[in-house]
Image (cartoon, helix red, strand yellow):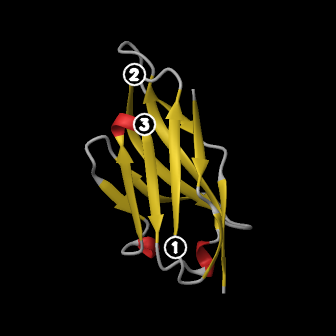
Amino acid sequence: LQLVESGGGLVQAGGSLRLSCAASGRIFGINTMGWYRQGPGKQRELVAGITSGGSTNYKDSVKGRFTISRDSAKNTMYLQMNSLKPEDTAVYYCYAAIVVSRFSSPSNYWGQGTQVTVSS
């Protein structure tokens, strides 16, 4: 079972990027999913989360600029990032609380991270 991220890169301030996170392997169901980021010299922080029912939450500094969504049929989550700022520069990690069978509890899985660099 793994999470694979894609979509990172280098963009100028004010630009946009769309991150994807695809879960594959033995999956019975996925509960909460979300995106964390870790900037240079900083601790990892939650950027946005989304429940299985579609409820979302965002870090204050990204509200109105970032949009999290998921396609449950594809076990895939997205992060649309608009109006990017240099302070958004970080490695972005996706996570998912995954249930592997009807008899198990959810466990957290993490992606390998994707670099987002915003130049001024």
- Could you tell me which residue is drawn at 66 percent across and 87 percent down? 120
Q: Mark 2, residues whose alpha carbon is within 10 Å: few (<14), some, or many (≥20)?
A: few
| CA–CA distance in space, label 2 to label 3 | 10 Å
Q: Mark 1, residues whose alpha carbon is within 10 Å: few (<14), some, or many (≥20)?
A: some
Where is residue 61? Give x, y as percent: 46, 75
Amino acid type at mark 2 = Phe
- Which residue is the site of mark 1? 16
- Which residue is the site of mark 2? 28
2 or 3: tag closer to the N-terminus: 2
- Which residue is the site of mark 3? 75
Where is residue 111? Give x, y as percent: 61, 43
Quarter location, residue 60: bottom left
Query: Is 41 positioned to the left or the right of 102 in the image?
Result: right
Amino acid type at mark 1 = Ser
- Could you tell me which residue is drawn at 57 percent across and 80 percent down? 85
Mark 2 lies on a secondary structure that is loop
Residue nearest the viewer, comparing 6 with 46 = 6
| CA–CA distance in space, label 1 to label 3 | 23 Å
Q: Classify 104 as above or below 74.
A: above
Where is residue 101? Give x, y as percent: 41, 16
- Could you tell me which residue is drawn at 35 percent across and 15 percent down? 102
Query: Is 53 positioned to the left or the right of 72 in the image?
Result: left
Where is residue 40? Give x, y as percent: 73, 67
Query: Is 84 positioned to the left or the right of 51 in the image?
Result: right
Quarter location, residue 63: bottom left
Q: Mark 3, residues whose alpha carbon is within 10 Å: few (<14), some, or many (≥20)?
A: some
Residue nearest the viewer, comparing 42 with 53 = 53
